[in-house]
Amino acid sequence: MPTKSIKIMVEGGNVKPGPPLAPTLSQLGLNVGEVVKKLNEATSSFKGMSVPVTIEVDSNTKKYEIKVGIPTTTALLLKEAGASEPSGDPAHKKIGNLSLEQVIKIAIMKKPGLTTKSLKAAVKSMLGTAKSIGVTVENKDPKELVKEVEEGKYDDLLAKYENEWNEVKE
């Protein structure tokens, strides 16, 4: 079965039936409106965020499968912080504040795309991104939280999410 993969970035829940997607789908003999509708349904939980999507098309049967990726860490942090874009000056201009639990949940969501094997390491990675875009965590500089996480200050909180972390497939 010859398959064709279409990899695109779409706005979650707001895919439009225009170029560059529509011509590609049409060439493969797919109903553009139907595919766009299914893409919007599949990405609706990431409304307003850029989401990587792969559409696997069987060129013989015209059947297709939509695989939705995970938005970037930056996009997830911005959404949680209620900000539309990163700070142009993260050292001086803060754009939002998150709880460590919110950061942990993002780390769990991102697990399939991470190379890190532990929740603690994943959280530290998320904190690094938060710092670079001007988001504070627990009303502190994320760099300070990285240190506290390393010291074990949040081990009890991390332990609460360890099972959830372990259940996510890599």
Image (cartoon, rainbow, N blue to C red):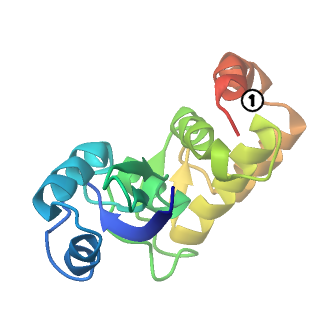
93 or 121: nearer the eye?
A: 121
Horizontal side, residue 11 vs residue 145: left or right? left
Q: In the figure, residue 162 lies in which quadrant?
A: top right
Q: Position of residue 116 (x, y in %)?
A: 80, 48
Question: Residue at 15% of width from left, 60% of height from top?
Answer: 31
Q: Position of residue 61 (x, y in %)?
A: 34, 52
161 or 47: nearer the eye?
A: 47
Q: In the figure, residue 45 lies in which quadrant?
A: top left
Q: How many marks?
A: 1
| Residue that carries the numbered disc 1 in the rendered image | 154
Horizontal side, residue 153 vs residue 43: left or right? right
Question: From this viewpoint, is residue 13 visible?
Answer: no
Question: Helix or strand or loop: what does disc 1 sit on?
Answer: loop
Residue at the limit of the structure toward the right, as seen here: 151
Horizontal side, residue 16 vs residue 117: left or right? left
Question: From this viewpoint, is residue 105 visible?
Answer: yes
Figure quadrant of the C terminus:
top right
Question: Residue at 63% of width from left, 22% of height from top?
Answer: 164
Indicate the amino acid at tag 1.
Tyr
Determine whether 161 is above or below 3 in the image. Answer: above
Q: Position of residue 143 (x, y in %)?
A: 72, 58
Question: Residue at 53% of width from left, 47% of height from top?
Answer: 139
64 or 156: nearer the eye?
A: 64
How many residues crowd mark 1 within 10 Å: few (<14), some (14–19), many (20+)? some
Horizontal side, residue 31 vs residue 73: left or right? left
Question: Residue at 54% of width from left, 43% of height from top?
Answer: 106
Determine whether 13 is above or below 26 in the image. Answer: above
Q: Position of residue 103 (x, y in %)?
A: 57, 42
